[in-house]
Image: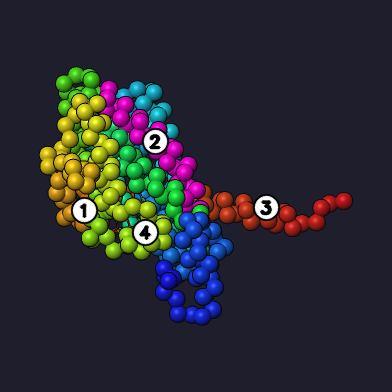
Amino acid sequence: MSITATTEPAEQAGQEHFDAIIAADQRIEPRDWMPEKYRRTLIRQISQHAHSEIIGMQPEANWITRAPSLKRKAILTAKVQDEAGHGLYLYAAAQTLGITRDEMTMQLIEGRARYSSIFNYHTPTWADMGAIGWLVDGAAICNQVPLCRASYGPYGRAMVRICKEESFHQRQGFEILMELSNGTPEQKQMAQDAVDRWYWPALMMFGPSDEHSPNSAQSMAWKIKRFSNDELRNRFVGMCVPQFEALGLECPDKDLRFDEETGTWITGEIDWDEFNAILDGRGPANTQRLRHRREAHESGAWVREAAAEYARKQRERDQQPIAA
Ligand code: FAQ
């Protein structure tokens, strides 16, 4: 049985080829026939992911000028640059599906596209850089390692490199928190407060619970997603438990429990009203993040115009006959 309904007889061969590739756990490449809904699902997910990387530069870039040492400043600058690179690989992967970078950018700055809920929170202290690295990059890795096996080739390959870099990011966040946790009582409290701020939003990064996730079943059948939102969220929590202990910090989830029967960690109640408010654009920093992105796009217009003009002149020069 085909895993996507098709009505056009002319599409039958393409559909059969597509189904066989998915069933054999091989990769769909840009020139292969693919169902229109598969293409649109990928554009949605990959562009949202790219936007998240680009918007995700803001909360940390905010601390580059105030990092507590030259070493920390250099590390944070490199991390923010890495996120820009991730955004670019992902925009390039989405472009192979027939959407332009301009279209994706306009969708973002006009508020028509989503980006991860996590980047709509403020970063009031240096410890937030530790909590973002440890929890946000940690959650991102947990979600993204299975995406390295996504059925769409360009996406899976982009994810391999991204995950390698995210692992460094996670370690640097953990190390910031470790240093603060072993510092003065005030520093330890600062680390705890930051972890309290970021823990629940990090769990929301995995998306709505499985029963409220409209896209999961189809995305899993197409092997874009390999695990459900709740499966990955619970896996992530399980990874955090021993790390909380190593850091000497308290887990803010007082109802967290290990279910012996299923062998998984079960989180306490997640505040889905907060999540939905952020998705509706009503989070603490939604307006600021989009305004900043829009202004950056507008102030970069002259660079795009100059690059286009340079390319035009070069094309013109290439067409001129070579002088004797
Ligand atoms: N925020 O049916 P599902 C990072 C939307 S990168 C906002 O479950 P799906 C690196 C979802 O789009 C972080 N919206 O959807 C970094 C859908 O809306 P739509 C980004 C969310 O796609 C670190 C609706 O809810 N990572 O952190 C969120 O099957 C530090 C229904 O949801 C990725 O994008 C959310 N958290 O599963 C950078 C990973 N969750 O489009 C800088 C790739 C759900 O129908 C600093 N993406 N929604 O209107 C994915 O794995 C999936 O797209 C999920 C959502 C799991 C996010």
Viewed as shown, does residue 250 lie left or right of 290? left
Question: Which label's residue is closer to the chain start, 3 or 2?
Answer: 2
- How far is disc 4 from disc 3 in space, using C-alphas? 46 Å
What element does badge 2 sit on? helix
Q: Amino acid at mark 2?
A: Ser
Residues drawn in magenta: 154-179
Viewed as shown, does residue 77 lie left or right of 183? right
Q: 42 or 187: nearer the eye? A: 42
- How far is disc 2 from disc 4 in space, using C-alphas? 25 Å
Mark 1, residue position? 275
- How far is disc 3 from disc 1 in space, using C-alphas? 49 Å
Magenta span has 136?
Answer: no
Mark 1 Cα-neighbour bin, 10 Å: few <14, some 14–19, many ≥20: many
Residue 242 x/y as whole percent:
24, 31
Q: For ligand 1, tell me if the residue under mark 1 lies within 8 Å.
A: yes
Mark 3, residue position? 314
Mark 2, residue position? 167
Of marks 4 and 3, the one in the foreground: 4
Mark 3 Cα-neighbour bin, 10 Å: few <14, some 14–19, many ≥20: few
**Contact, CB < 8 Å: mark 1 with mark 4?**
no
Q: Amino acid at mark 4?
A: Met
